[in-house]
Image (cartoon, rainbow, N blue to C red):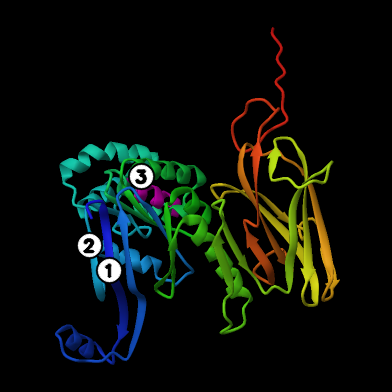
Amino acid sequence: MSNVVLNLHNVGKCFATYRSNLWRYLRWFGFPVRPEQEYWAVRDISFTLQAGEALALIGQNGAGKSTLLKLITGTLRNTTGNIAVNGRISAILELGLGFNPEFTGRQNVYLSGGLMGLSTSQINEIIPAIESFSELNEFFDQPLRIYSSGMQARLAFSVATAVRPEVLIVDEVLSVGDSYFQHKSFDKIRQFKEKGTSILFVTHSMGDVRALCDRVILLEHGKILKDGTPDEVVDYYNALIAEKENAEVNAEVNVEQRRKKNGWVFTRSGSFRATVKELVLLDKETQEKVETARVGQKLVLKLTALIKEDIPRLVLGYMLRDRTGHVVWGTNTWHTSQIVNDLKTGDEVEFRLPFTCTLGPGSYSFSPALVSSDTHLENNYEWVDNALVFDVVNTDKGFFIGTNWLDAVFQISRR
């Protein structure tokens, strides 16, 4: 247990309403007063966080993510269960939380630092670093009320990370900052992680989750729905959202998921009114199946769709991802104006996508989606994450680094 910095056991938070404040006061003093209504924002939450581990909490709005973070930081008191913290927690929960809008940025550093348990002498030592990292310049000595949301985010993050904590909690606040400061902030988070800081991260950006986190917990209706690796939980969450958007009221959500022998997670969802009958990667010249492609090789991605029920139109979309889950490329036939209309049961449609393999060496996957428009949220007939996995090797294109090969040659003139 020495490496556990955070331990939650059967944690729950109930918000109750009473007939009057008198009834609420009586409940506080132990009288057996029943509330009129109870709403459990989170219930029966149990997990541990290890030193140096980055854990993301994901889920739809209202799933209980922010409530759980407030319980961990002590902003709210849990109704049931126990929360044990080993070390200093630094949290960025809401813009302006703990700040006074009439104080300057500098004054708010002293205010917030004091709330974090830092002495005035300690704040004096770190305030130059906070001022430098936030890059607020002359605004650092201006009232907070004139700050934009992005400037508030800069100040909040700079204060929270001025002293490396054992646990850093970040709740969406960085999404309001500019892209430059987001990159700067994530770089600092990675540095903290390498030094042993545990990260508890709430965001709707699945790219950030894949890039930063070792583990993901999916919350739904205040309970843990899935706890696992980023690729597994994120793909499941995306499929779940698509299914919910397409399902009728009270209809069962249908998501199939398994991990292949090659390590990639296969996730399948949809109504299956149209399905993928065949998906294969071919050499363009020989038409032979390709499992390992060469940099610069001419390829064809062939998919055959089988229509199980009459549908008014069919759109095929592809998402190409690298081994870390980052999207390398994607498009669909809606955007290329190649929609297939009026399909009947039993029809088959063949899609061929010729392309040159300009990818860097590594492992990649194609995820196809059979839908009816530019999004899978309207009619998701079938969506398969990591349906086709292939490797890329470099044999004759010379040395290069990165995920993409450019057909480029230096032109040099000496003068």
Q: Amino acid at mark 2?
A: Ala
Q: In this figure, which residue is indicated by the disc labeled 1?
A: 9
Write the residue at 28% across / 44% down: 164
Question: Quadrant of the rendered structure where residue 291 is?
Answer: top right
Q: Which residue is mark 3?
A: 193
Quadrant of residue 388 within the rendered picture: bottom right
* Amino acid of disc 3: Lys
Q: Which residue is mark 2?
A: 84
Q: Is residue 310 magenta?
A: no
> Is 155 one of the magenta-colored residues?
yes
Marks 3 and 1, how far apart at CA: 24 Å
Q: Looking at the image, is mark 2 or mark 1 earlier in the sequence? A: 1
Question: Which portion, as a residue range, is magenta?
Answer: 148-158
Q: Which of disc 2 and disc 3 is earlier in sequence?
A: 2
Q: Is residue 353 shown above or below 311?
A: above
Q: Is the magenta region chiefly helix, strand or loop?
A: helix
Tell me the SS state at disc 3.
helix
In the picture as drawn, the residue positioned furthest to the left comes out as 29
Tell whether label 1 touches label 2 (CB within 8 Å).
yes
| Inter-mark Cα distance, 2 to 1 | 9 Å
* Residue 407 on image: x %, y %: 73, 30
